[in-house]
Image (spheres, coloured by chain):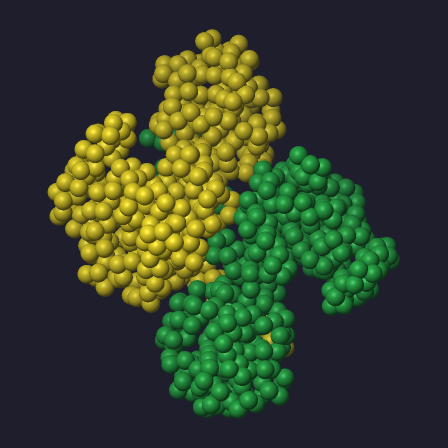
Chain colours: A green, B yellow
Amino acid sequence: MDDVTAYVQELGRSAREAARQMNRLDPGLKDRALLTMADRIEAQAADIQAANREDLERARAEGLDPALVDRLELTGDRVAAMADGLRQVAGLPDPVGAINGLSTRPSGIQVGKMRVPLGVIGIIYESRPNVTADAAALCLKSGNAAILRGGKEALSSNRAISHIMRTVLAEVGLPEGVVSVIDTPDRAAVGALLTMPEYVDIIIPRGGKGLIERVAADSQVPVIKHLEGVCHTYIDADADLDQAASIALNAKTQRYGTCNTMETLLVDAAVAESVLPHLGERFRDAGVELRGCSRTRELVPGAAEASEEDWSTEYLGPILAVRVVADLDAALSHIAEYGSGHTDVIVTESYSRARRFLREVDSSSVMVNASSRFADGYEYGLGAEIGISTNKLHARGPVGLEGLTTEKFVVLGSGQTRG
Amino acid sequence: MDDVTAYVQELGRSAREAARQMNRLDPGLKDRALLTMADRIEAQAADIQAANREDLERARAEGLDPALVDRLELTGDRVAAMADGLRQVAGLPDPVGAINGLSTRPSGIQVGKMRVPLGVIGIIYESRPNVTADAAALCLKSGNAAILRGGKEALSSNRAISHIMRTVLAEVGLPEGVVSVIDTPDRAAVGALLTMPEYVDIIIPRGGKGLIERVAADSQVPVIKHLEGVCHTYIDADADLDQAASIALNAKTQRYGTCNTMETLLVDAAVAESVLPHLGERFRDAGVELRGCSRTRELVPGAAEASEEDWSTEYLGPILAVRVVADLDAALSHIAEYGSGHTDVIVTESYSRARRFLREVDSSSVMVNASSRFADGYEYGLGAEIGISTNKLHARGPVGLEGLTTEKFVVLGSGQTRG
């Protein structure tokens, strides 16, 4: 075993032990730790920013893309937001230990399900160093140990943040192993993290599609992920057309770079002529390039021709694919064929078609008459989210504290044996 | 692509299409199909048994282990039980479509979770042909399409059963692709089934540890599995000792070959002398070979010496490992180190230690004062089970209809956009 693998395995062993200890410690210590961490991050903002400057200087010297350098920077506001985030997580209800559905069976045993931590969570992420605090806080609150692997460009910042968190853990009497940062730029560390099922229960990658695909391909433990959001809005024949226009504009233009942004607009042929010319103009005014089917291009002068590839592209920018479809069935088929199972929306006043869309679209979020931009842990009331999952199993959609836990059966008996 | 892969992919494509259609058909058709299948299986018992005789003759000619030949045989009783099983599944509540937790958010959208089928389920199993009907029925009731791959020794039986099921599906107006059997003994078919995530959402292997390990290693889609059940009973210092003895005897001897059978007995040192001599005798009378630690061997004359390997062995037979431990912490450490995360039991009258055991043991079922043999879908009230999962994610413990479904977020709006 090489040194890097041995190092990561040692972190894993220590995290597994810490996770076990968490199960027997006073749950109130978790919130005390989070609140103290928040105070300490504010008090030691200067140290964090000094470490961050090392990362920034190295990044600039290495000619990193200015957009990435910007994401790397921990301004005073961003440090304050990090501390606030910890306080918010501390304020959420503790998901651990709840027993649901306890009922008595004919044999006399009582059977229910207890919500418990997953154990050890590996987080692999790219440049933003605030993820270190956010992700660690969610893992801690849900009773898990976290092993964090940030981008090598943020190594000093992540080290400074995790040093504060670990110091506080020790102060309040929690095992330091609950939060660890892989403190080497060596890429072999990721490979090691993905292949130790004895120490890691689940991996959550946060970053671009390339990172997530690599992690999913190499991991020997389950991965909570979403590869991309090719989100659709379907304007049905019975839509309120003003509402449809406002939802479509919001879904595309409120933010371009998020995974719940609309990438393809589907319009029922029956209303295409009433909707598309005006809506096309509004998209153009907003600076959105339209790529349409032939019917769209008849109705929207200046729209480019959509290629087959456009239907499955997540633009993450001011481009929108537009297709006129014959009816709901055609819309459903289009979404099944080209969608990514993230978030899809129907705008309609038809009860039956709303119901069919809700039932038949196989995506992590399915909406009627609302902007896809609502697909978000905060908007859904989860309090905070660690990401959005397009997995079908376990956590699907925005993943909050509950998604970082699992359930086990508990049986309370009074001496029952099976006959 | 070779012919077998092309054939399995075509089954997958057809199953995927059938699963989509299931979402739009009258849910009542599922029960009608199940009840009709039950009648038809009874009416055509002779055909099924004739097909089964072909399998039996081939198996005997090939010198198959008599125990396996016995499992392969479809007696009249077993055919009747198969039909009854279908009727029971028809009688269970339909899990699909329930919307839970629908609540209104500050933005005005209503957010809830809808229970939906997983999609397409691949089932890989060994000789017992009744699994064909059982598994297909659970998949159908939960709205999924099933692709079944039985053992090659049961090919004729499985073909006869699935022929009846598919005929009935077509008669009641459900797509035949909802149930398909891979109708070739070629082993490459399993490889193909495990590596088409575009058509298969989840794999459930049923069989020996070797089969399950191979499937888990090769699968590109999630696998619901349990590798083994190394189940513990821990007799605490504050146990009711008569109760403890009766639970331990039941957990070991009620059936030897099941995964929820106790394989290791842990006894607190404080009560070892009161418990072990008498209990050891009762196990010996029941024909159970004991393999103990040195303290056990002092207290139970004739007990063999347990090796390190015994602590992690699933005997599936009349052998029991016995260890005297210093206290609850030592018991918890033993279970964490050697257990398989299946089912573990404490016998105690101590409130605090019962509570610690429930919280700290990380197994799919954790019990107080009851026999581990209760870890079972029927005993838990799930109605039926397709297996027991020791996965942490998704379905954990006995897996019933709910474990064959997932949830998606649904959002009901009235034109909301995000500000």
Q: How far across and down, in percent of the image, does residue A410 sit? A: 48, 40
Q: Relative to residue A202, is residue A2 drawn left or right?
A: right
Give me the residue at 28% from left, 46% from top: B184
Q: How far across and down, in percent of the image, does residue A412 sit? A: 47, 37
Image quadrant assignment for residue B281: top left
Which is more toward the observer, B408 or B213? B213
Q: Quadrant of the C terminus of chain A?
A: top left
Give me the residue at 17% from left, 41% from top: B51
Q: How far across and down, in percent of the image, does residue B28 sit? A: 27, 62
Q: How far across and down, in percent of the image, does residue B191 sit? A: 40, 46
Which is more toward the observer, B254 or A262? A262
Give me the residue at 29% from left, 52% from top: B180
Q: Relative to residue B142, is residue B106 drawn left or right?
A: right
Image quadrant assignment for residue A373: bottom right
Q: Is residue B302 above or below residue B133?
A: above
Q: Quadrant of the N terminus of chain A?
A: top right
Q: Relative to residue B52, is residue A384 drawn left or right?
A: right
Instruction: Decide if residue A228 is in sight here.
Output: yes
Give me the residue at 47% from left, 12% from top: B304
